[in-house]
Amino acid sequence: MEATHMLKGFKEFIMRGNVVDLAVAVVIGAAFSKIVNALVDGFINPFIAAIFGKTDISGVWNFEINGAKFSIGLILQAALNFLFVAAAIYFFIVMPLNKFAERRRRGEEPEPETTPLTADQELLTEIRDLLRTRQP
């Protein structure tokens, strides 16, 4: 009896919308990160190299104290990589999608077509609407 209760609780946990949504977000995020990294490695870093002659500053400001190695350039490189990724996401993904949504609100872009409801879906919609009208 205890094991079935545990399995039921586990099933409820897994089937919660937020857990499934989170799993989907992680998978999509992993796939999307490859696109962003390719954009940074294939366009932004070579662009910086064309201007400044180096794509990597991790080798600057390195020093050693009592055998411990410190690298300020490594920290700066990580911060720059973060800014490059954030800029790539903003300028190539967020900004165009915001422009598209703005045009859609103004009526310049048509709304996506919806598929017609099946007979079961229409019946469920009617039942839902009737239940809403009955609530106090």
Image (spheres, rainbow, N blue to C red):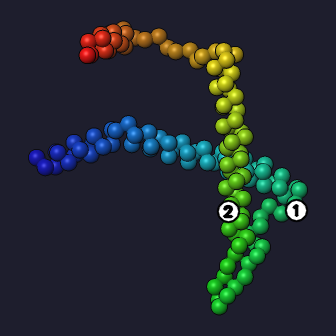
Q: Which residue is drawn at 47% across and 10% down?
A: 116
Q: Mark 2 points at which residue?
A: 78
For disc 1, the neighbor class at 10 Å (few under 14, some 14 to 19, many from 20) is few
Residue 36 placement (x, y as % from top left)? 67, 47
Q: Name the residue under label 1.
A: 53
- Please tell me whether mark 1 sits on a helix, a strand or a loop: loop
Furthest-left residue in view?
A: 1
Numbered tag placed on residue 105 in the rendering: none
**Given the image, on which type of amino acid does mark 1 rest?**
Gly
Horizontally, residue 54 falls left or right of residue 58, namely right
**Given the image, on which type of amino acid does mark 2 rest?**
Ala
Q: Which residue is drawn at 31% across and 15% down?
A: 132
Residue 39 placement (x, y as % from top left)? 72, 47
Question: In the image shown, does 134 or 107 lie closer to the viewer?
Answer: 134
Horizontally, residue 102 falls left or right of residue 7, namely right
Furthest-bottom residue in view?
A: 66
Furthest-front residue in view?
A: 136
Looking at the rendered image, the quarter that the C terminus falls into is: top left
Residue 133 placement (x, y as % from top left)? 30, 11
